Amino acid sequence: MRSFLLFTPALALMTMGCESDARADCFAPGTELPKRRDTLTDQRLGAAARDFAEALYDGNLARAGELLRADPGLARRRVGAQYDMLSVALATCRAEAVDLVIHGGATLDGVDDKGLPLRLALRAGDPGFAHRLLSAGASPNPRGNPIGPLRTAIALNSLGAVRMLLDFRADPNVMEATGNRPLHTALDMEHFRIAELLLDRGADPWAIDSGGANLGTAATTPMLTDSAEEAQAQHRLAARLAKLGWPDPAPSSRDVRAAAAAGNWPPAGAAGAKPVQPEVLALIKANAAH
């Protein structure tokens, strides 16, 4: 069992003097947080739950603790359509509030097990929030959205967040219905350093999605973004292809789809490669028919 991180002086300074509402400045731009007004006017919560949420927003953790002791179920209350009390605690950017709700019995994977609290925590400027949730038992591949946390970390181009999730046993080959995997997401976003990490941690280099997305095409296609670090990482990925037995030149996504539909992907030289998943192959064939 991993221990919780301590409330650091740096985080204490960050939370001093903050408004009694969601701390958008503590999160990556575009993060959608539960808002104080929406929460406190949600009539489905009931008076005790609204008081608890108000205490969290205000940083009145003594009051929040009293309410929680009187009704432990408050930590598990749903807030609006997608949030919960753990999301409210995270939105305040107060580590002590997050710990209070976690220890109070919060549902760590959020509403409908979609992992929203962890995805919010990954978007925080302080990685300690995500570490707190993962240490407490939040799933890096939540049942309702298995790829969600990794997709969030990849979209942020956060090598550290992806590594943290993998350290907590996130599956690097978790797959969406289309066959898209974290590796494909990283390659599509030209986050090649993350693609390297995923491959180092067990991502299948021969995996394709229903569109034919694959490592070889991404590693040999001229970049659209301007980043020296990512360009160097793409070059290293291209150097891996020969060692893997990749066809030279690397086939296009269209060629990969055609090979898969014909039963010729992965190619004969791909020692130990797994076959294309039946559901992905069915999508490729269905799309080709149209």
Image (cartoon, rainbow, N blue to C red):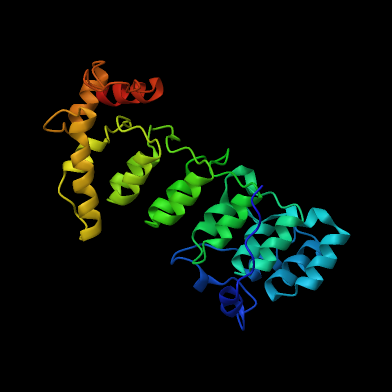
Q: Quadrant of residue 253?
A: top left
Residue 13: x and y in percent read: 58, 80
Q: Quadrant of residue 262?
A: top left
Does 221 appear above or below 24?
above
The residue positioned 32% from the left and 23% from the top of the image is 273
- Taking the image as shown, residue 164 lies to the left or right of residue 289, namely right
Residue drawn at (40%, 23%), measured in percent from left and top?
279
Percent position of residue 29, x then y: 43, 67
Tell me the quarter of the image containing the C terminus: top left
Please tell me which residue lies in front, 268 or 285: 268
Point out residue 194 in the picture as x, y percentages from the top left corner. Answer: 35, 49
Answer whether residue 152 is visible to the viewer in this image.
no
Residue at the outermost left position: 249
270 vs 94: above or below: above
In this picture, is 274 found above or below 70?
above
Q: Quadrant of residue 247?
A: top left
